Each structure stands twice: as structure tokens, then as C-alpha cells.
Image (tube, rainbow, N blue to C red):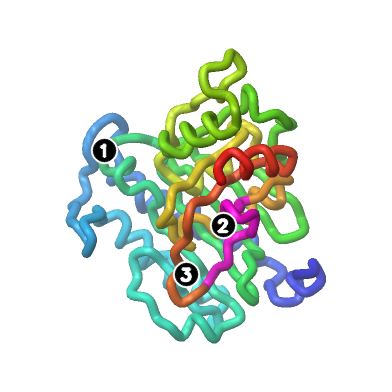
């Protein structure tokens, strides 16, 4: 979407207001978090067995009220809110993960985040990923670059698969190394610890700390959309193995295997994973 069109649909003071709301949301979540220990929040299982905590629900309810006040006409899609198909017919949609990396949050691992995106006609035009434990905030507006705590960020200059720093599911990394012709060689992939929050996995590619972020099947829009824009604006991309960018706000907001990378690594990584 052209920048002029983006600015036409966003209130002039939207960015600082969203920033303030996300920081408030972080303050709601943090009292439930205990680094290195189990959360103090109540925990139960959703249908399918994935965990949800009292903190997820609290942050979700807060964000829904406050973000909806900013743009009353925008629809809503969130991990912790019952899906309303009315979003499919709306031009503007908030996509939110109140706590991305719930298992990390409940076990005391600091790598969880709050992820927020605003879609316009299916494209992310505003993206925020907050890491509350470190007080870090990644942001992007379409066409205006990406920042970490207000400072511009950029993907790494890595252009060779050999020596690339990779994080994500081990089976995908094994496949990339094997099919990329690196298995057993001195220039094999540099395996980084897995980052539990998908949104953080993507923005760490955006800031150049990770060269390739791998994402297994079944990621949802709320895991990806905000971080996707941040990565795009930092010179990278989130891609399916067919080389296409994700499509958001579909009836089923579910995705297949994905990669997050600098554009210079696009062909080498996609070839290695196909």
C-alpha cells in the first residue's frame, strides 16, 4: 500500500498512542511473571491442549478496549478472543497476541512478547512487538522503516548460507543444512537457541541478531503480522517455502512453514528447504 494511502487512514497521533497502550499492557502482564520460576497467574488449557494464563486474558481484554477506542471502525482478531467473521469484510483489522510465547511466560523464560498489528486491506501497516522483561519495543509503520526503542534497525548483511545464524525448529534447521549442502562441513549453520516467541524470533532477524528464523507449520496471524511488518521495513521478509509473503485476515488465519530472512539469503534458504 502506498505511504500516502497509509497515512490517510491512520490518525496522526496513532503511533504514540499505541506505544503507550502497549507499555500499559506490559505493566499488566509483568506482575504475573517470575523469571526462572513458574508464573503466579492461574493457568488452564484451551481446546487442543495449549495453555492460557490469567495474564493472557487480562492483557487481551485491556488491549481490545483501548485499541478499539483508537479506531472504532476496525475489526479485531486475537488469540484469546472468540473469532468474529465480520473481520473478513473490514478494511481495518487489529491483530493481537496478548502474550506470544505463553509457555515461556508461565515457565519463567523471559523470551515472551506482546504483539500488535493493524491491517489495512489485508496488509500490515502498523506493527509493534514488545519484550516486557527487558522493556524493549520494536515498531514499524509501512514505508517508514523499523526501530528498536526508537533507533533504526536493519537486517544482517549475511549473504551466504554457510555460517548463517539460524534459530527455530531443529527438523527444519537439519533439513536446511542437509539440502543446502552444509551437513558435516566446517561452514555449517550456526545454531542459536530457539526463541519461544515467534514475534521475537522475527524481530531479532530484523535487528540483525539472527540471520534466518525458521517457523514450523501452524503459526497464526497474531504470531506474525506485527513482526512481519517490522522485518519488511528492516530490509527482510517473511516467506512461505513457495517464496510468497503470508496472506493475512483469511477465514482460517493459519500458515504453513515459513522463513524470516534478509533478502540476500532468500534463494539459498528457499532452495535448501524445498
Tell me, yes or no, if residue 199 can be seen here.
yes
> Few, some or many C-alpha atoms within 10 Å of disc 1 (few <14, some 14-19, many ≥20)?
some
Circle number at residue 107: 1
> Few, some or many C-alpha atoms within 10 Å of disc 2 (few <14, some 14-19, many ≥20)?
many
- Upstream in sequence: badge 2 or badge 1: 1
Is there a contact, CB below 8 Å, between mark 2 and mark 3?
no
Position of 217 compared to 149: left or right?
A: left
Magenta-tinted stretch: 238-249
Tell me the distance, in whole angstroms, between the alpha carbons under discs 2 and 3. Answer: 17 Å
Q: Residue at x 43, y 83 (%)?
A: 85
Judge whether residue 102 is colored magenta: no
- Upstream in sequence: badge 2 or badge 3: 3
Measured from the top left, where is residue 83 in percent x and y?
37, 76
Circle number at residue 66: 3
Residue corresponding to mark 2: 226
- Upstream in sequence: badge 1 or badge 3: 3
Amino acid at each position: 500500500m502506498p505511504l500516502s494511502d497509509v497515512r490517510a487512514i491512520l490518525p496522526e497521533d496513532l503511533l504514540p498512542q499505541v506505544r503507550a497502550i502497549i507499555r500499559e499492557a506490559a505493566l499488566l502482564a509483568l506482575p504475573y511473571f517470575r523469571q526462572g520460576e513458574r508464573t503466579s497467574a492461574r493457568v488452564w488449557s484451551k481446546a487442543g491442549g495449549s495453555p492460557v494464563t490469567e495474564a493472557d486474558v487480562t492483557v487481551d481484554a485491556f488491549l481490545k478496549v483501548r485499541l478499539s477506542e483508537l479506531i472504532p471502525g476496525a475489526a479485531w482478531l486475537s488469540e484469546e478472543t472468540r473469532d468474529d467473521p465480520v473481520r473478513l469484510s473490514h478494511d481495518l483489522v487489529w491483530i493481537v497476541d496478548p502474550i506470544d510465547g505463553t509457555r515461556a511466560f508461565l515457565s519463567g523464560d523471559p523470551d515472551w512478547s506482546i504483539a500488535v498489528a493493524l491491517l489495512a486491506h489485508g496488509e500490515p501497516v502498523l506493527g509493534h512487538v514488545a519484550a516486557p522483561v527487558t522493556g524493549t519495543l520494536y515498531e514499524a509503520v509501512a514505508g517508514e522503516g523499523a526501530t528498536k526503542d526508537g533507533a533504526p534497525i536493519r537486517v544482517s548483511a549475511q549473504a551466504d548460507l554457510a555460517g548463517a545464524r539460524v534459530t527455530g525448529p531443529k527438523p527444519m534447521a537439519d533439513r536446511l543444512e542437509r539440502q543446502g549442502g552444509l551437513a558435516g562441513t566446517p561452514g555449517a549453520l550456526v545454531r542459536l537457541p530457539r526463541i519461544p516467541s515467534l514475534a521475537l524470533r522475527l524481530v531479532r532477524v530484523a535487528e540483525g541478531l539472527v540471520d534466518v528464523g525458521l517457523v514450523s507449520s501452524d503459526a497464526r496471524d497474531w504470531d506474525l503480522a506485527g513482526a512481519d511488518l517490522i522485518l519488511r521495513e528492516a530490509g527482510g521478509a517473511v516467506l512461505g517455502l513457495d517464496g510468497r509473503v503470508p496472506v493475512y485476515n483469511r477465514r482460517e488465519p493459519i500458515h504453513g512453514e515459513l522463513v524470516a530472512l534478509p533478502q540476500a539469503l532468500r534463494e539459498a534458504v528457499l532452495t535448501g528447504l524445498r
